[in-house]
Image (tube, rainbow, N blue to C red):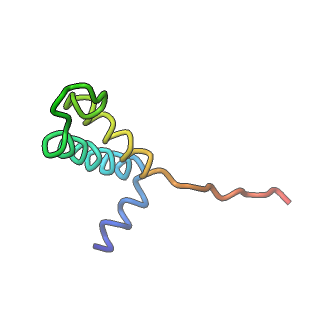
């Protein structure tokens, strides 16, 4: 497990892709298992929108919260 976390730290694009894939899978699972029977829910009534929303949430979660500021002093 340590090798995977070290690799993800070295490859930030892989981290974002992994979290986006997990988010897309979670978005589809939400659509499939919970969804919206009436079709009036804008996110959960369409599987493509639900997957895209899940991928976006996965991408947001994968980003670092704060960047370290380097001073020139």
Report the front residue among 29 and 41.
41
Q: Which residue is drawn at 31% across and 70% down?
A: 3
* Residue ranking furthest to the right: 73
Tally of numbered discs: 0
Q: Residue at x 20, y 35 (%)?
A: 36
* Left or right of residue 10, residue 4 in this image: left
* Residue ranking furthest to the bottom: 2
* Left or right of residue 28, residue 56 in this image: right
* Left or right of residue 63, residue 73 in this image: right
Q: Where is residue 60 in the image (x, y as percent from the top left)?
A: 44, 46
Q: Position of residue 61 (x, y in %)?
A: 43, 51
The N terminus is located in which quarter? bottom left
Q: Residue at x 26, y 50 (%)?
A: 22
Report the front residue among 61 and 71.
61
Q: Which residue is drawn at 86% across and 60% down?
A: 73
Q: Where is residue 23 in the image (x, y as percent from the top left)?
A: 29, 47
Rendered image quadrant of residue 7? bottom left
Report the front residue among 70 and 22.
22
Q: Where is residue 43 in the image (x, y as percent from the top left)?
A: 30, 32
Report the front residue among 59 and 4.
59
State whether residue 63 is above or below residue 38.
Answer: below
């Amino acid at each position: 497990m340590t090798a995977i976390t070290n690799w993800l730290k070295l490859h930030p694009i892989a981290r974002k892709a992994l979290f986006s894939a997990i988010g897309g899978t979670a978005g589809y699972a939400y659509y499939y298992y919970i969804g919206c029977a009436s079709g009036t829910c804008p996110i959960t009534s369409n599987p493509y929108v639900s997957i895209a929303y899940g991928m976006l949430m996965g991408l947001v979660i994968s980003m670092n919260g704060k960047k370290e500021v380097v001073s020139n002093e």
